[in-house]
Image (tube, rainbow, N blue to C red):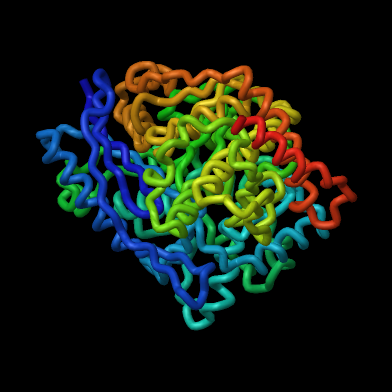
Amino acid sequence: MTIVAGVDFGTLSVRVTLVDSQKGPIGTASASYPLHRKREDPDHATQSHFDQMNALTQATRDVLQQTGTPGSTVAAIALDTTGSSVIPVGTGLQPLDEYYLWCDHRAHKEAQEITSKAHELGFEGIQWCGGTYSHEWGFSKLLHWLRHNPEKRDQFVTALEHCDMVAATLCGITELSQLKRSVCAMGHKWMWNPKWDGLPPEEFLVAVDPLFKGIRAKLGGEYLTSDHLAGHLSEKWAAELGLKAGIPIPVGAFDAHWDAIGSNCKEGDAVNVVGTSTCIIAMAKKAELVPGVCGVVPGSVHPQYTGIEAGLSAVGDIFDVIAKRAGKSVAELSQGLDSWKPGQSGLLRLTWDNGDRTVLVNPELGGVTLGWNMVSTAQDELFAAIEGTAFHTRIILERMAEHGVRIDRVVNAGGIPQKNEVLNRIYANVLNKPILVPSGIPTSLGSGIFALLAAGAYKSIEEAQAAVCLPLRTVKPEPEAVKTYEQLYQLYRSVYFALGTRNAAPVALGAVLPELRKIAAAARG
């Protein structure tokens, strides 16, 4: 029997789960930290590294106490984080500023410049991240920071992804030469790929902006998959966390990627990690470019596979906003929706409220609701928004399948599928595939699996998954609902590309509103 700690840093809290190599998860605890926004700048979203480390300390000590587990018996600790959450650091790898959180969208201009220059110079890396570099990703955020913090440029040593910063902190690493970087993080957000000797070439970066001169060397360190170690827990942090010094810490990764591993992801699976946003994760032994899909990276999900990442920029956030506008919680507004039929609301909702991450890769879009009438309600909009996220997910899965990514099963992971059966049923009917739902929240279980590997409890991910992953229950498609959703999806698909693509070819949309009314009337009748 081996006990390890799996850590997951989310947007607002950190979760620590103790995992027994034979029993699976035996206890979990979480602690929150603030998200810093500015009313005068809605794109601003940052967090303090020190707040997060304090929360990690609290959650770790809480789970040890709750389970009665002596800290000295924990054999390894592994961690995943949000991404791309970027922090500039100076001497001793100490923060020069707060994290630019994944949902910080200030770097629009920088992302456009990187995309434009990559296409102009023919840099292959842009194709491997869907043809468009995102304002959410590393180089965009770093360039924005360099431009807006001239007084700190001389102190700048490097920039770190959240997962690498936390691992370095816990290991007591203070020198760039000793740093281990996550292939997962750097591949999906910084255009790292072995095909072109790692990071984009210096000439390309400097062509984007001379401020990038020398930045490639400053992004040094060893780039590794998560079956390697970032280091070992330092004496200082062992004392803080109540654990044993010297235990191994594997190279970290992004939360959704390890959530997929914790959800028993295998080749042929698509895992929807549904939360405030949705990350869609798949893996393949061999993968080609997928237009509009934001990351195809060797070793990023499973060290022996190529990881594929896509997603929706907002899901749970949209549900929350709809409910807040109605003065209710999502749970209150959802009451009774379990008896609703496909298209009953009469609305078609495009969930672009935070832009489109995949497949249009366009942050400038906004939410669209078609079909409003004089008696439409907030509950109608919530139901249509759930349907809209399912339609958008189908757009993405079809694009992946068109380019050779095999999808046999769909797993709905993350927190929302645990408490929203309406969403699971709608997804099964829209995708016309059985939806598999873990019998508990797998968040931080993927971290536990990599910690078990680091501790030597298992020899492979598959062996560890078989031992500790939660059972999956099945939500099956309903034939009549599938037929109706096929009609609605064709309407959605037409509107999605017509409104979401700049300079789109003319599309006849005159049938959309009459068809929505017809489908709604049939559902109510």
Kindly tell me whether residue 218 is visible in this rendering.
yes
Residue drawn at 74 percent across, 41 percent down: 291
Exactly how many numbered labels are in the figure?
A: 0
Instruction: Tell me the residue at 55%/34% (across/down).
Output: 281
* Residue 380, percent from left and from top: 54, 45
Residue lying farthest to the right in this orientation: 506
Q: In this image, 108 relative to 64: left or right? A: right
- Image height check: is 206 above or below 196? below
Residue under the image location 45 percent in, 73 percent down = 38
Nearer-the-camera pick, 413 or 135: 413
Residue at x 46% of width, y 75% of height: 39
The extreme bottom residue here reads: 151
The front one of 479 and 287 is 479
Residue 405 location (% of width, % of height): 67, 27
Q: Is residue 42 left or right of residue 465?
A: right
Q: Nearer the viewer, residue 430 or 42?
A: 430
Quarter of the picture holding the N terminus: top left
Q: Can the viewer see residue 199?
A: no
From the viewer's side, name the closer residue of 376 and 171. 376
Q: Position of residue 512 (x, y in %)?
A: 77, 43
Query: Where 201 sits versus 214, above or below?
Result: above
x, y percent for residue 74: 20, 34
Q: Quadrant of residue 47?
A: bottom left
Q: Is residue 428 left or right of residue 37?
A: right
Query: Quarter holding the C terminus?
Result: top right
